[in-house]
Image: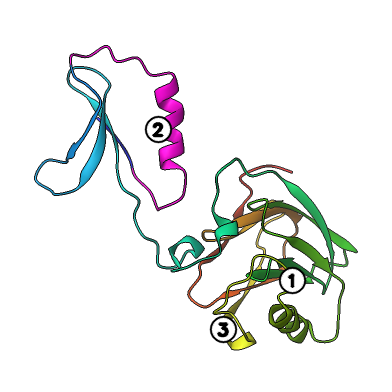
Amino acid sequence: SAYVIGAKGVGKSAFITSFLRQYRNTSNRGVGISSYKETSLEVWQIPLSDEASLYDTPGTGIDNSFTGISGHPKEIDIYEPLVERKVDVAENGSLFIGLLARIDPINVNSKKKISFHCYFPKKVELKAITPKNDMNALFVKYIQKKAMKPFYEKLEKGSDFDVFDFELEANGPRDIGIAGLGWVTFKGSVGDVYRITVPKNIGVYASRAKIDK
């Protein structure tokens, strides 16, 4: 048997729906909802044969993800494939990701601009901010004026955010991702430093690129 397991809102049901469009039941059992054995957990059970099934399980919670925040902005919910958007950001400038997060290239080995290939829900506004003396104050000003979407009412001041610095340890295409929101892909160099600002308790990561650009 196979089990579809993952966090809420990551596309498990969309995967199952796509699978069912091409599905042909050759077993002697029907598709249905039932409690998984020895638990009270209700799951979709889709026969793959007389002996095996595909189980679609309820989504699990993720405490460090945007989608796990109670009352999170509806603009971050994903109902269709993410479409790449390219945004060029100057060193010491910033990429504002709505008013939920930002990414600042703070040391990029003398490159004039960094091209971020951005994968976020289309209703999340993206904006390249030219370098200012106090980028933190500018970000808070945007938040107070609700100058971009989405915004989250509980984010009001700089102390509502955590800041992480990532120093790249390899050359080539890299990703910086924000749990439950999306990610950017860019070409990096060893020693480049990127600063990521996110709400407290939201997870971030840096890794090899999922999509080579």
Label 1: state its secondary structure.
Answer: strand
Distance of label 2 from label 3 (alpha carbons): 37 Å
Distance of label 3 from label 1 (alpha carbons): 18 Å
- Looking at the rendered structure, the kind of residue marked 3 is Asp
Q: What residue is rendered at 61% in x and 84% in y?
A: 156
Residue denoted by label 3: 160
- Quarter-of-image position of residue 159: bottom right
Mark sitting earlier along the chain (3/1): 1
- Looking at the rendered structure, the kind of residue marked 1 is Asp
Q: What residue is rendered at 40% in x and 33% in y?
A: 16
Range covered by the magenta-colored residues:
5-28
**Which of the numbered marks, if any, corresponds to residue 104?**
1
Label 2: state its secondary structure.
Answer: helix
| On-image quarter of the N terminus | top left
Mark sitting earlier along the chain (2/3): 2
Residue denoted by label 2: 16
* Position of residue 153 measured from the top left corner of the image (x, y, whole percent): 57, 77
Tell me if 111 is positioned left or right of 54 in this view: right
List the single residue furthest toward the right.
Answer: 112
Q: Is residue 209 magenta?
A: no
Label 3: state its secondary structure.
Answer: helix
The vertical placement of 30 against 74, above or below, is above
Q: What residue is rendered at 57% in x and 57% in y?
A: 76
The vertical placement of 186 against 98, above or below, is above
Tell me if 210 is positioned left or right of 132 in this view: left
Mark sitting earlier along the chain (2/1): 2
The vertical placement of 135 against 185, above or below, is below
* Position of residue 157 measured from the top left corner of the image (x, y, whole percent): 63, 86
Q: Nearer the viewer, mark 2 or mark 1?
A: 2
- Looking at the rendered structure, the kind of residue marked 2 is Ile
| On-image quarter of the C terminus | top right
